[in-house]
């Protein structure tokens, strides 16, 4: 469009891809979002410093904050989005419900906090000021309500700066259907069809598609007209999304208006041929919408690739993205991403790595293309939901269009593949060891010239995430034959089918001392300790086990460890306090999600090893708990010595 771009960035993002791609880039503060990306004053200063005449807020952080729109209006800087009063009205789900009711748009029954029991169970607590699953909890029973309310409010305050909550009846078996709307500054309003976003985890969408499967033309038009009615009520301008719950019986209910471009906007772009972000800018410049909306062409579907561990409650995963190779050259497949090989995935922001979107003449073709694209997308160094997305797309309920927001499409653990990857790693590791030998290169691996009953010279390989105590009965044994090893490729036959495995070593970066007090960057591979392996079977991080593993011992103490990297929000116990199995110990936050760490045994808190504000690593000890039996023994020993 011939428009120069200015990126703003936090300290953590100083080397991020968007910073290097922009014409200019301005630092706006430390890594925590509330000190940088949520700092309106810093962002406005960056605009003044660079003489920018417009601000696009993206689809996170301040995108639905009326204060930045107001600041732009006062500074005579164009805000590429709706007017501040519209954002303010829709920023409160409570106010949005009132306006919807005034417009005659159906809404989900709700009550004030003190009247929650009148709704019956299950019910839904959600942040009035935000979205994306933050500050949202389903409550199944009365005794769960207070804890869920406290956690939801805390999460909402940190994510949106507003802890107000809405209590609604939870509509079971409902689908999530939304309508994309556009409004220009001349009173013209258009809907660009619907998107079905029913596949979710942690109340956040992970797969979106258009058209919505299994919806009649008549129902589609009714929902679209309700969205336009809401848009007219607001005098809506620029891009927005009106969201609805579609009940199994065909009733639909207004949820909210997202006053911004959505993460899933490429789905609409693929079926309409439009560029919605370009249109946002054009509408902000005063241009009119087209006289007629385009026809909907074919079917599009998007999957969100996250750095997270599906088999561990979808907890976020951090670290270095050592391998990033998205599929290229596929007709009808689009990749939207802000990462590259070497990108650090930290605890401060949402763990979204990429959006992968596929388009085809029909739903089945689009799904098939998306599965193929995911299988050919390499993302290693952090755990991802890639395998889970493939499992969902291949699930018979999804293929039949039977999923809803509560569908339990649980992640599978492909344990039989772990054995294959470990065997490939072993063969490759041995091959590499032989090729690097300078002495007796022809001697067999692990050869000893003296008799010894117990072979201790070999170490096995294990996929990260696989249980060390896994029994053979836990998975199907696979027949693996190594055919050829050349460079970093292993050809193997698995159960009679040939696969090509690609292998990459983890890079160790560091700094070694040199003369004069300076430092010098050093790098190297890890001598087979960590390998990233992938094939059409999947991808795994494989580690070499120690030759001399330590014997595990049982004791009467246990530690509560962090299941994820994050920041300590609250310490919920004191030293010496008695706790029971399941009692809350520590509240952690990572990537805008809160997780409560609970006791795994009855006992007494022996030591608290962290404090609020601490940044913790996965597996780090947080609290030590000593069994009551152990305490009794210690007390009797003390009495005897007295």
Image (cartoon, grey):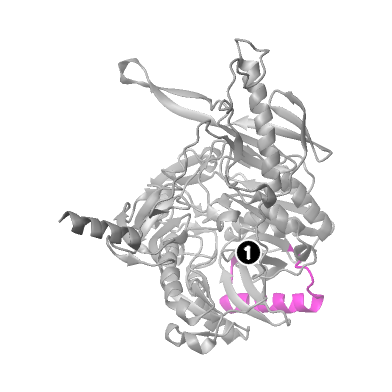
Question: Can the viewer see residue 274?
Answer: no
Which of the two residues, 548 or 91, is positioned nearer the viewer here?
548
* The image quarter in which residue 322 lies: top right
Q: Residues within 10 Å of mark 1 (few under 14, many from 20)?
A: many
**449 vs 241: above or below:** above
**229 vs 540: above or below:** below
Q: Quadrant of the C terminus?
A: bottom left
**49 vs 240: above or below:** above
Chief secondary structure of the magenta portion: helix
* Residue 54: image location, x then y, percent: 51, 54
Residue at numbered disc 1: 200
* The image quarter in which residue 169 lies: bottom right
Q: Which stretch did the figure color magenta? A: 210-238
Which of the two residues, 450 or 23, is positioned nearer the viewer here?
450
Tell whether position 225 is magenta. yes
* Residue 536: image location, x then y, percent: 75, 41
* Residue 323: image location, x then y, percent: 61, 37
| Residue under the point 66% across and 52% down | 413
């Amino acid at each position: 469009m011939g428009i120069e771009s200015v990126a703003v960035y936090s300290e953590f993002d100083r080397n991020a891809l968007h910073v290097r791609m922009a014409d200019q880039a301005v630092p706006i503060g430390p890594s925590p979002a509330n000190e940088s990306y949520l700092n309106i004053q810093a962002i406005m200063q960056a605009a003044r410093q660079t003489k920018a005449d417009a601000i696009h807020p993206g689809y996170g952080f301040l995108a639905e904050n009326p204060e930045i729109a107001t600041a732009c209006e006062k500074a005579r800087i164009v805000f590429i989005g709706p007017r501040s009063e519209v954002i303010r009205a829709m920023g409160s789900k409570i106010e949005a419900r009132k306006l919807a009711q005034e417009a005659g748009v159906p809404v989900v029954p709700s009550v004030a906090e003190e009247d929650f029991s009148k709704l019956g169970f299950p019910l839904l607590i959600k942040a009035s000021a935000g979205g994306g699953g933050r500050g949202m909890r389903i409550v199944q029973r009365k005794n769960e309500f207070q804890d869920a309310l406290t956690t939801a409010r805390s999460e909402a305050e940190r994510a949106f700066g507003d802890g107000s909550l809405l209590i609604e009846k939870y509509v079971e078996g409902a689908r999530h259907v939304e309508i994309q709307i556009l409004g220009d500054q001349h009173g013209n309003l258009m809907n660009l069809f619907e998107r079905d976003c029913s596949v979710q985890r942690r109340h956040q969408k992970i797969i979106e598609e258009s058209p919505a499967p299994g919806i009649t033309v008549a129902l589609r038009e009714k929902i679209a007209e309700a969205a336009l009615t809401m848009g007219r009520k607001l005098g809506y301008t620029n891009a927005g999304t009106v969201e609805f719950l579609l009940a199994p019986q065909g009733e639909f209910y207004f949820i909210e208006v997202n006053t911004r471009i959505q993460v899933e906007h490429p789905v609409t772009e693929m079926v309409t041929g439009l560029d919605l972000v370009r249109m946002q800018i054009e509408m902000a410049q005063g241009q009119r919408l087209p006289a007629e909306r385009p026809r909907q062409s074919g079917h599009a579907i998007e999957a969100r690739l996250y750095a997270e561990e599906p088999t561990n409650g979808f907890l976020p995963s951090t670290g270095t993205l050592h391998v990033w190779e998205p599929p290229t050259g596929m007709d009808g497949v689009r990749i939207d991403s802000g990462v590259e090989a070497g990108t650090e995935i930290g605890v401060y922001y949402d763990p979204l790595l990429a959006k992968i979107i596929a388009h085809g003449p029909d739903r089945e073709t689009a799904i098939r293309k998306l599965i193929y694209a995911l299988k050919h997308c390499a993302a290693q160094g952090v755990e991802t939901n890639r395998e889970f997305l493939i499992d969902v797309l291949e699930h018979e309920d999804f293929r039949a269009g039977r999923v809803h927001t509560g569908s339990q499409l649980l992640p599978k653990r492909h344990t039989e593949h772990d054995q294959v990857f470990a065997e490939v790693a072993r063969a490759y590791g041995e091959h590499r060891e032989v090729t690097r030998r300078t002495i007796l290169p022809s001697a067999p691996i692990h050869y000893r010239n003296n008799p010894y009953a117990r072979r201790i010279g070999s170490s096995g390989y294990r996929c990260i995430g696989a249980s060390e105590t896994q029994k053979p009965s836990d998975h199907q044994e696979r027949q693996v034959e190594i055919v050829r090893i050349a460079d970093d490729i292993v050809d193997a036959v698995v159960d009679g089918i040939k696969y090509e495995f690609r292998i990459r070593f983890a890079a160790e970066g560091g700094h070694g001392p040199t003369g004069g007090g300076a430092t010098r960057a050093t790098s190297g591979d890890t001598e087979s300790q960590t390998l990233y392996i992938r094939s059409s079977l999947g991808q795994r991080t494989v580690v070499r086990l120690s030759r001399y593993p330590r014997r595990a011992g049982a004791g009467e103490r246990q530690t509560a460890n962090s299941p994820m990297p994050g920041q300590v929000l609250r310490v919920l116990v004191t030293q010496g306090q008695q706790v029971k199995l399941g009692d809350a110990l520590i509240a952690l936050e990572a990537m805008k999600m809160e997780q409560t760490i609970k006791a795994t045994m009855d006992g007494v808190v022996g030591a608290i090893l962290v404090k609020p504000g601490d940044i913790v690593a996965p597996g780090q000890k947080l609290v030590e708990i000593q069994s009551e039996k152990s305490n009794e023994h210690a007390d009797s020993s003390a009495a005897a010595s007295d």
